Amino acid sequence: MLGVARRRLGSGTVLGQLMQTLRPAAAPRTYSAAAKEITVREALNSALDEEMSADPSVFLMGEEVGEYQGAYKISKGLLDKYGPDRVLDTPITEAGFTGIGVGAAYHGLRPIVEFMTFNFSMQAIDHIINSAAKSNYMSAGQISVPIVFRGPNGAAAGVGAQHSQCYAAWYAHVPGLKVLTPYSAEDARGLLKAAIRDPDPVVFLENELLYGESFPVSAEALDSSFCLPIGKAKIERQGKDVTITAFSKMVGYALQAADILAKEGISAEVINLRSIRPLDRAAINASVRKTNRLVTVEEGFPQHGVGAEICMAVVEDSFEYLDAPVERIAGADVPMPYAANLERMAVPQVEDIVRAAKRACYRAVPMAATA
Amino acid sequence: MAAAALLRRLPAARAPATAFMAARPISDSTATLTIETSIPFTAHLVDPPSRDVTTTPAELMTFFRDMSLMRRMEIAADSLYKAKLIRGFCHLYDGQEAVAVGMEAAITRSDSIITAYRDHCTYLARGGDLVSAFAELMGREGGCSRGKGGSMHFYKKDANFYGGHGIVGAQGQLFEALNISALWKLPAILVCENNHYGMGTAEWRAAKSPAYYKRGDYVPGLKVDGMDVLAVKQACKFAKDHAVANGPIVLEMDTYRYHGHSMSDPGSTYRTRDEISGVRQERDPIERVRKLIYAHDLATAAELKDMEKEIRKDVDAAIAKAKEISMPDTSELFTNVYKKGYGVESFGPDRKEMRATLP
């Protein structure tokens, strides 16, 4: 009940913020029967459906998106509804169909190119970077590229080294691209709609393990005009002792860590980044100026990762506010192993986030007190 | 030798009638047999090899045994996947055994093979053993990649088998490979295991020209009945001779997979069950060899059945053994990142908690 009220009010209003602090200790998904829940899969499917309905220039292209109903069933029903001119099954030719997609965008269509996983986007990365991202700049604004590249990103379960990489840092490195990372069903709907409507190339990084997860959604989020702003993070949980930034699946882990930390008297603020490029530096800095401590969490490899950029963003803007070194939790610095025990060690776990947050909090404690 | 073979191969208890039949042992003869392939070869830019394939009874028996072993391994993998002992992706090769087996009959272990993710049987054909295959599938340290690769990443360097790769499909890369191998006259054989479906997409929806053996354009090619192990052997022998002398050649193996693309794909939403059972009925590679064995009186039905029973036992024993093998040691997380690590550090998710020096 509180949760529903909080969602309606949002965190922007004073009453909304009050409702935030009255939030029950339980995980953020115990709501009254009145709140509707949808899966991330349903959220993505409905967003695609609504945007294709609203704008005839929007079309979907990729492997198995049509007759197979989508490799992960995200595009279920769309071929039947919109026909083969708007839902195109491609051969297994990433470079080929990405090139055609970018060309279509040059001509003013609004393609959505699906990669069965972003690991396969590497077959087409030259088109994403050189044909899409840089065109508006190189042509001095003549050629804009309103394209969305979407699909599952990061680790799944037991799929091995070539199928588990996170590409957030890779794509967010490039000026000219926008990179979005939804977590909840509301994120999925609002950010995908925003991406499709955006005039620039957007890399939309989903997560296979989140597709089946259910989240409550407000009536506002279910409306077909719903859209979330690009470049704005969401404070998923307010706190005052330490800031934890995360995106995609790691948001759920960060929230679990925050619950555990709360029991030990540490109030963690969890930021769902939602947008890796542009990165919401303002929200991150505002949070760190409040808590003075920061833990960055990501699934991808650590070196040159998203956490490294966030750390620098805080050092540049809020150095004097930091009371402890910035902590970084990331995937292990090794190709993803297949064996179950090794894979568990290679991916961040909730206890890693808890441990790092505690380190960030006790760093200012005098040594005598710890003896 | 024949008597010893007799004693080795016959089971202990025999009914009187079959005891009389058993006077002729399962053939391990190396006498030449000439057998016609199911259909002639179709050729592009080259004269096709003859339909008459020379083989021996011993070789035919080996074909039967090897393909049956592969078949049983893949079916067992299906069960292990459903029991959640195999995780992630699992792409099964049952139906395509003749390609892996026929190819090996024409080449040596000094010839190199590289393939995609449907690699379990290729590994076996290259001399891999059942225990290391199952151990790898179950992520144990006794696996051929010590549990670190999984189903799609089997390798056997000492047999010149270079894997085992998960990322496929780019057609432009095929053209680049054809061009450069033709330009430089490289002794390369490009084998297309044409099982007619790319995941859920039938070839007529994915390829403007389904004549893949002609896709090499200036590179010659051969279309082969990939369900006929003798045709595969003949084609590969021909291709190797050609490649060594003249440069690249394309082989299109017309084959079929009984399972879906992977264990996540039922395989029946984009093709009919009639089609699948039809192929099994008309073209199964093991059944074809079984018929040849009967036709040339190389073994009886009972003997083949016993062989299959033994294979089943071997597979079950290998699975049991693999299940006993432990998961890799946690230190293996950081091994083999580099061949030469220069002493740099690598990290776990929490670098203050887990780190290692790469030697």
Image: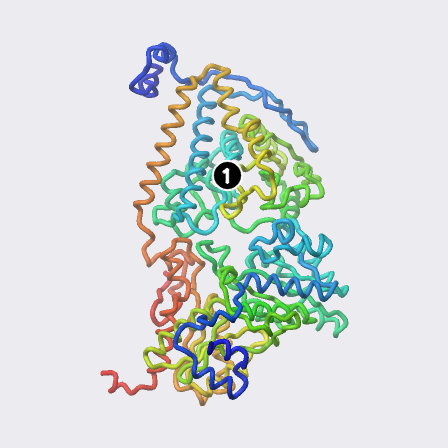
Label 1 chain ID? B
Left or right: residue B70 compared with residue B7: right
Residue A80 spot, x, y in % from top left: 68, 53
Q: Nearer the viewer, residue B178 or A341?
A: A341
Left or right: residue B336 compared with residue A122: left
Whether residue B205 is situated above or below residue B51 in the rendered picture = below
Q: Residue furthest left?
A: A371
Q: What is the quadrant of residue B306 in the picture?
A: top left
Which residue lies under the disc numbered 1? B93
Amino acid type, callout 1: Tyr
Q: Quadrant of the N terminus of chain B?
A: top left
Q: Which residue is drawn at the image coordinates 46% and 34% (left, top)? A: B71
Whether residue A369 is situated above or below residue A349 in the rendered picture = below
Residue B191 spot, x, y in % from top left: 58, 38
Residue B55 spot, x, y in % from top left: 51, 21
Q: Nearer the viewer, residue B109 or B76?
A: B76
Q: Is residue B240 visible?
A: yes
Q: Quadrant of the C terminus of chain B?
A: bottom left
Q: Is residue B189 visible?
A: no
Determine the secondary structure under disc 1.
loop
Whether residue B230 is situated above or below residue A255 in the rendered picture = above
